[in-house]
Amino acid sequence: MPNYRRLLVPGGTYFFTVNLRNRRRAILIERIADLRSSWREMEAGRSFETVAAVVLPDHMHFIWNLPPDDDDFSTRIRLLKSGFTRRQSATLKSNGRKGERNIWQRRYWEHCIKDDEDLSRHIDYIHFNPVKHGYVKDPDDWPYSTWHGWKREVGRPINTLPQNWKPTHLGEA
């Protein structure tokens, strides 16, 4: 069994990718209200700042800033996944792993942001991901992203963090 090592940095800024187990499903955008509710519920119990986020039909990318004395992103992701799962139909078959029910891949990808340039590249990657996957021709056309807030505050192209920017939740205005 592999020994996964995660870089834990109190107050760190992290980029994440979280995938559905069945990549042919579109449940994340079909049930976006459930995902938003799960996000807010988890955020209320464990503070953090969402820097950027995008939700696609079968996966999502996001960047979080953790509080200065906190490096526990794994609990936050577990709570987000289990909260979303709990909101789904009771008819979903369980795979025997609490909180997953055949919805989520067990693992997720994380990357500790190194500097402002690394952050800028990852923010651009997040906001242009719907274009990369062919869902839209322009990030303006994708509703499940923090892009619209960034565009209002920073304009195009994104290359710096705006002062006093307050993120929206997964594309809500």
Image: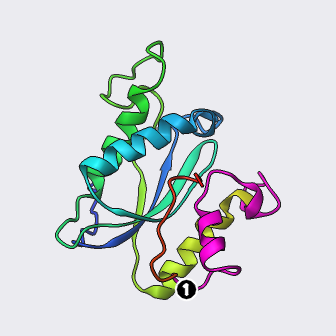
x, y percentage for residue 122? Answer: 54, 73
x, y percentage for residue 4? Answer: 29, 57
Say which residue appears at 34% left-offset and 42% top-offset.
Answer: 41
x, y percentage for residue 65? Answer: 35, 69
Dot 1 falls on a residue whose secondary structure is: loop
Is residue 43 in the magenta section? no
Work out whether residue 1 can be spotted.
no
Work out whether residue 150 can be spotted.
yes
Q: Nearer the viewer, residue 154 or 23?
A: 154
Question: Split into 4 quadrants, where in the image is the C terminus?
Answer: bottom right
Tag 1: amino acid: Thr
- Residue 145, relative to residue 38: is it above or below? below
Is residue 145 in the magenta section? yes
User: Local crowd at mark 1 within 10 Å, few (<14), some, or many (≥20)?
Assistant: few
Q: Which residue is mark 1?
A: 160
x, y percentage for residue 12? Answer: 30, 73
Image: magenta residue range: 132-161
Q: Residue furthest left?
A: 69
- Predominant secondary structure in magenta? loop
